[in-house]
Amino acid sequence: MLVCLCNGLSDQAIRAAAENGATCCKGVWARCGCRPDCGICGQVIRDIVADHHARPRGHAVPAVVLAPAKD
Ligand code: FES
């Protein structure tokens, strides 16, 4: 599911960023190599990151999904 339309970030990419240490929106964007634009996705990103960190370890996400989608 595409979450950040400005940067083409999917929920999988956000979970991969969380797996790699992101704890907030800024961390997600930084780990995905992008920056916030409109910021409207912020609450959804925070919810996904919080959900990811609330889950038991062992749900590794392939690093390949870290790259933002290109047009
Ligand atoms: S939708 Fe994510 S910064 Fe605009």
Image (cartoon, rainbow, N blue to C red):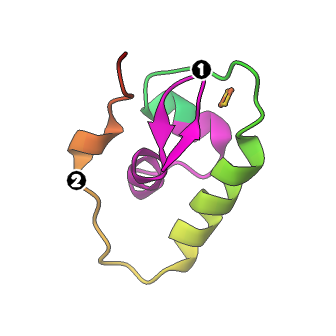
Could you tell me if the residues under marks 2 and 1 are in contact, i.e. CB atoms within 8 Å? no
| Residue on which the image places disc 2 | 62
Front residue of 64/30: it is 64
Q: Is residue 38 left or right of residue 16?
A: right
- Name which residue lies at 40% across and 52% down: 12
Report how far apart the C-alphas of labels 2 and 1 lie in the structure: 22 Å
Q: Which x, y percent locates residue 31?
A: 44, 34
Q: Quadrant of ligand 1?
A: top right
Q: Which x, y percent locates residue 53?
A: 54, 69
The secondary element bearing badge 1 is classed as loop
Q: Is residue 19 above or below residue 26?
A: below
Q: Is residue 4 left or right of residue 61?
A: right
Extent of the magenta region: 1-28
Residue 26, numbered circle: none
Q: Is residue 57 above or below residue 65?
A: below
Which amino acid, mark 1? Arg
Q: Is residue 59 above or below residue 68?
A: below
| Residue on which the image places disc 1 | 35
Does the magenta run of residues contain 14? Answer: yes
- Name which residue lies at 35% across and 19% down: 70
**Quadrant of the snapshot with the C terminus:** top left
Q: Which x, y percent locates residue 24?
A: 65, 47
Between discs 2 and 1, the one toward the N terminus: 1
- Name which residue lies at 37% across and 27% down: 69
The secondary element bearing badge 2 is classed as loop
Circle 1 Cα neighbour tier, 10 Å, few/some/many (<14 / 14–19 / ≥20): some
Count of numbered marks = 2
Front residue of 7/29: it is 7
Q: Which x, y percent locates residue 8?
A: 48, 29
Which amino acid, mark 2? Pro
Q: Is residue 39 left or right of residue 59?
A: right
Does the magenta run of residues contain 5? Answer: yes
